[in-house]
Image (cartoon, rainbow, N blue to C red):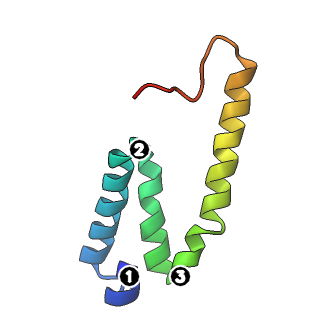
Amino acid sequence: ILGYFFGPDPWVLALSVFLAISLMAYFRVIHPPAGADPLVIIMTGESAQFLLFPVLPGSILLVVIAIMFHRMNQQVDYPLSKV
């Protein structure tokens, strides 16, 4: 959204990555490479719908694969339910 209104200026790129990583930290789902998503979207001029496809389905697929992989190993409880 920032890129749509302000263009691909360096401060917009920095702020968008900051916001993405801050939200991940708040929700305790930090994945630093996901901070590149705002960079890719803003620098390529993609719309926010880019997050709905392919980013969201790809993320869901990765989580499903991780759950299946960890369920095969009975010694590991995944996802962790610690609060």
The image position of residue 16, as x and y in percent, is: 33, 68
The residue at the point 61 percent across, 52 percent down is 59
Amino acid type, label 1: Gly
| Residue designated by label 3 | 47
Furthest residue in direction top, as rendered? 75
| Residue designated by label 1 | 3
Q: CA distance from mark 3 to mark 1?
A: 9 Å
The image position of residue 53, as x and y in percent, is: 65, 69
The image position of residue 30, as x and y in percent, is: 41, 44
Of callouts 2 and 3, which one flags the residue occurring earlier in the amino acid sequence?
2
The residue at the point 51 percent across, 80 percent down is 44
- Specify whether 71 is left or right of 49: right
Position of residue 80 relative to residue 30, above or below, is above
The image position of residue 54, as x and y in percent, is: 66, 66
Circle 3: element type: loop
Badge 2: how crowded within 10 Å, few (<14), some, or many (20+)? Answer: some
Circle 2: element type: loop
Say which quadrant the N terminus sits in: bottom left
The residue at the point 44 percent across, 78 percent down is 43
Amino acid type, label 3: Ser
Q: Nearer the viewer, residue 58 or 71?
A: 71
Amino acid type, label 2: Ile
Q: In the rendered structure, find residue 28 and report the number of the disc placed on it.
A: none
Furthest residue in direction left, as rendered? 11
- Specify whether 41 is left or right of 77: left
Circles 1 and 2 in contact, beta carbons < 8 Å: no
Circles 2 and 3 in contact, beta carbons < 8 Å: no
- Residue 73 figure quarter: top right
| Residue designated by label 2 | 30
